[in-house]
Structure formats: C-alpha cells, structure tokens
Image: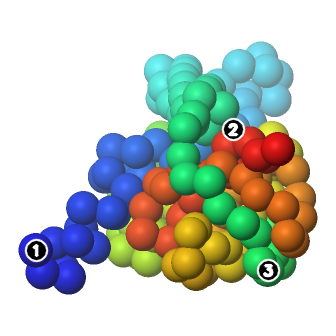
Amino acid sequence: MNASSEDSSLRLRLWASLLLFVSAYSPLLLILVVQDLDPQAMLPKHPKLAAALLFIAGLSIAAVLHAVREVQGGLVVEILKASNKSGEMFGYTIPYVLSFLRVDLGSWQMMLCLLIFLGMTFAIAYRTQTVFVNPVLALAGFMLIDCTFKRDTVESQAMVLSKRPLVIGTRCRLERLSHYLYVAVSEVE
C-alpha cells in the first residue's frame, strides 16, 4: 500500500467532517435567524428557512456531542509531552464577523455568497484536517492538546481532544480519528 492511500484511509470521512464543520458554525446559524426576526412580531421573516437553519444547527450539535462521548476503546499510550492548544479554537470566530453584516435570508444572492464562502472554508478545513478545531466542542469542555506519546517503543505526536488535562508520565487510552488526531478516552491505572 502506498503512502497516499494510507493517508486517505486515515482521513476523517467526508460526512463526519461536514457534520463537525456545520456544528462549529451552528452559532452563526442561530445569529442569522435572530437577524431575520421581525421586530414587531418577533417571528422570522423567512420562517421555513429559519426553521431549517435551527434544525440543522441543533441536529449537528447533538450528533457531534453524542459521537464524541461514545468513543470507546483505543490504544494505551504513555504521555510524554502535552501542550494546550484550545486557543486555536478561536480561529473559528473570524467568520462570525459575517453575522454583523446584515444578511438577508430572503436574498438568494446573499445566501449563495454565504454558501460559497462556507463551502470554501469547509474545503480548507477538510483538506487540512482541522475540522476538530470546533468552538462547540470547546464549550462542551473539550480541550485541544498537542501531545507527544509513546506506545510500546514508538513515539508519536498528534492533536488530542480531551475533557481532562493530559498529565505527563501517565498512561491513557487514545482512539484514533484521523492521521494526526485522537480522542482521549480514559486514563489507565
């Protein structure tokens, strides 16, 4: 098996990456719905689209949080180095600036422009495997940790999603999600 087919087999599946991406932008969807509210009636001017955006946001958040909680198994490793990189999750805040521009959900041109922008952003996040840099996971208490660990005699470095700080010198169980991304499942006694 050549290196390129190995890399593609370790790439997070497209649908899972898309779900993670949408969940990361679910607060933006909520902001767009709030912007669409009629001030007198306090109801969306475009109720079907607003309901669809709220449904997509809610479903993506619930699915991602459920999926990350259900991760089990994994490799037993010893933590050699760990550095909290959770601040990188703020990189997702830049596109939220869009929400302070008046976005008209009734304008097909504006919605198409937004879809093009988010599509391009997703393509970059998918190609660079940064879809886990997700503010929703940060709000749920997950940290993004740059970690060096050892399994048997092999030393590796990867990003790890964890609810708890990883302590140097301890052993824990990591489940591999993609080539350089793991989830910390549990500590090992």
Give residue 53's mark: none
Q: Secondary structure at mark 2?
A: helix
Image-quadrant location for residue 103: bottom right
* Mark found first going from the N terminus, 1 or 2: 1
Q: Which mark is residue 30?
A: 2
Q: Is residue 26 left or right of residue 120?
A: right
C-alpha span from label 1 to label 2: 45 Å
In the image, 83: left or right of 172?
right
Which residue does the image show at 73% across and 28% down from the upper left?
Answer: 38
Determine whether 106 is above or below 91 in the image: above
Q: Secondary structure at mark 1?
A: loop
Q: Which quadrant does the N terminus fall into?
A: bottom left
Residue sitting nearer the eye, 175 or 189: 189
Question: Is 6 situated above or below 143?
Answer: below
| Mark closer to the chain start, 1 or 3 | 1
Q: Which residue is mark 3?
A: 81
- Report the Cα–Cα distance between label 1 and label 3: 31 Å
Residue 122 lies, in percent from the top left, at: 43, 64
